[in-house]
Amino acid sequence: MVEFPALTLMLLLPALGVVFNLFLGGHAGRALVNMVSVAVVAAAFLVGLWAFYELLTLPAGSALKTTLWSWIYVGRLKIDLGLRFDALAAVMTLVVSGVGSLIHLYSCGYMGKDSDYARFFAYMNLFTLSMLVLVLADNMLFMFIGWEGVGFCSYVLIAFWYDNAQFAYNGRKAFVVNRIGDAGFLLGIFALVASFASQGVWTLDFATMREHVGGVSPVVATVAALLLFLGATGKSAQIPLYVWLPDAMVGPTPVSALIHAATMVTAGVYMVARLGFLYQTTPAAMEAVAAIGGLTAFFAATVALAQSDIKRVLAYSTISQIGYMFLGAGVGAFGAAVFHITTHAFFKALLFLGAGSVMHALGGEQEMSRMGGLRRKLPVTHATMLVATLAITAIPGFSGFFSKDQILEAAYVSGHYWLWALAVFTAGLTGLYMFRLFFLTFYGTSRVEASRLPGLHESPAVMTVPLVILALLSLAGGWIGLPAGLLWGDRIGEFLRPIVGQAKAAPGAQALMLSAIASIAAVIGLALALVFYVAAPGLPALIAARFAALYRILRDKYYVDELYDLLVTRPLFFLADFALGRVVDSYAIEGLVDGAGAAARTGAGAVRRVETGNVQHYALTYLCGALAVLAYCLYYSIRHG
Amino acid sequence: MTPVSYYLALGAVLFGIGVAGVLIRRNLIVIFMSIEVMLNAVNLTLVALGRALGSTDGQVMVFFVMTVAAAEAAVGLAIILAAFRSRHTVNADELNLMRW
């Protein structure tokens, strides 16, 4: 542990951006707001690089740290606001601030016509601040501040265009669903506090918890791990709390890229990796994480097949990819999960920004049925999207391949054959739905509405430059995690190993075979998409008609929203409207308030009758009072001499 | 030498008569006279105690009470006169406009 006070700068810089945009943004003008907002995030990234460089000079497994101030000192419980920059935090910090600054830059172009830009950038900077708190915090409670902060920013940014009632509703939905998960997260923290306190450990910082995790009873560990995982399913959009993410796509596209693809939604995976020492003590929780991850990956991929909104497809693909990350974490390959967070941040941010570029060109169009044939008009977007699509499909050589390969290998080697098979099948589906999106958007005949054709244009440089940088990262970003023994080997895995451990590797030939199987599945998916959407464009409609029921189920997302509406939303609304609104509010609350008024009126009506206006009545009262005082004085003096 | 308790008892009785008069009688003039009885009952008590304790304080206080009583008689009678002029009555029961 080495003291490194400059870590504070990483929080201070985005915080400055928030304050500036909030209080001066309205007067400062667009150019200055753009500059400050991008500069603070980029500067935080540079500080991150500096800290990363410092960390590399230290022996493996060490950490930079600094304490902001003492926070909670209650009895023996001591919790400080401390920052900890170890290998895991380093990877996350660099991804958050690096991809974040590219997305901030892109936003300058994307939000170029929106008059509310200062509010937008204030929220974006606040998000960056919260996310950095989340990944840099050295204890559970400080992490929870960041956890809640990103949730809040997600909510306000989904509902950014709040004058649309549906958008505002979707924002609230995201917030409420996250709240369910956060309740689990809090309960998990309570369980940990109780368990550690019973061992005499009155703190929640990760290093101390790691030392004493052996003393946590298996039952408590399982319960706490599952509760925390419930929080992760909310934040990271996994079964059963994933329903908010597809609806979150109504926010501005840079928001979708930054929050709902690259960073915030991976917070759950980060949390599980950070608490890997806890999860590894409880096989039941690990199995749950792996199973939920694998199932979510498959489930979301099937839904993505039948969606027609470009951002919704990407939302389901995000859910699916995060499912892969949880699968990796659940089988013990935390390093692989974090590696996939990194590569996913590159290619998924790129996909969203590319989709945003398409929407920008088409005046906000999101329906793929009104796109098509855009590759000539949007050459840069087309090329970069191709790279990203290849990366997410995990075609060998692209970044997604290396990280997904590590996860699949770990799943197979750890004996989760069913989940492995499901994940491989899902890899095929990924190729199919991602290239469906790609071909429907950029190839085939143009279905763009005639009124939009004249305005069709490639996005300005401020938007395409981030696309190109992210494309390069999507192309090459995976090479930091080559299979062990090949060239420079698994650098990111070795870097992370002291913090998160490493999964058992497969023997060389087996690893190669596993990679080949996954790659073949991906290529089959790609080829099917090529057949369906380029070679024989009539075929998908035929298949949809042939399997109409299945198609409807997929298109309508398995009716999960409707199910939740029936099982949760309606009963709750009924409870609120009837039980609480009509009964408790009408009778108890209103009765209390009205009763207070009525009691005062009745009481006063009775008491006022003593004011008779007859001066002799007053004199009599006065006499009685005087006699009472006299009697008391007499009694007192007799009693006490 | 008459014991002081005799004077005190007489004072108390006079005071009680005054109180009863104030509370029971309805004519303002009578009530007013009853108040004078009460004041003088107190005066009697003060001089009796002053003499018993060998102090002139009691007598000094009585002079003050008599002065104030004179002023009070003037003001009180003026009020009663004003009330009679506007209401044509000096009955306390009928002067009850300030009520609930």
Image (cartoon, coloured by chain):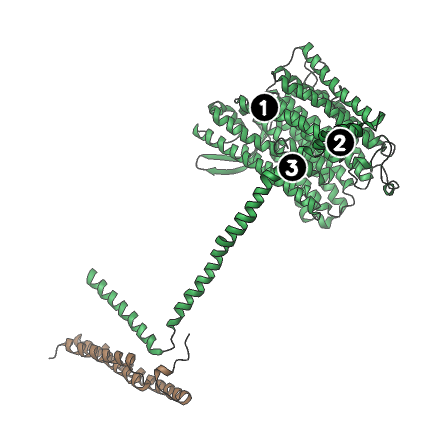
Q: Say if residue B83 shows up in the picture.
A: yes
A507 is higher (above) or lower (below) than A431:
above
Q: Nearer the viewer, mark 3 or mark 2?
A: 3
Q: Name the mark on residue A638.
A: none
Q: Which chain wears green? A: A
Q: Are marks 3 and 1 on the same chain?
A: yes
**Which residue is label 1 attached to?**
A62
Q: Secondary structure at mark 2?
A: helix
Tag 2: amino acid:
Leu
**Which residue is label 3 attached to?**
A561
Tag 3: amino acid:
Asp
Q: Name the mark on residue A351.
A: 2
Q: Nearer the viewer, residue A12 or A127?
A: A127
Chain B tint in image: brown
Q: Nearer the viewer, mark 2 or mark 1?
A: 2
Q: Is residue B16 left or right of residue A369?
A: left
How far apart marks 3 and 2 lie (CA) works out to 26 Å
Residue A84 in percent (x, y) is at 58, 30
Q: Secondary structure at mark 1?
A: loop
Q: Is residue A630 left or right of residue B89?
A: left
Decide: few, some or many residues near mark 1? Use Cα within 10 Å; few <14, some 14-19, many ≥20: some
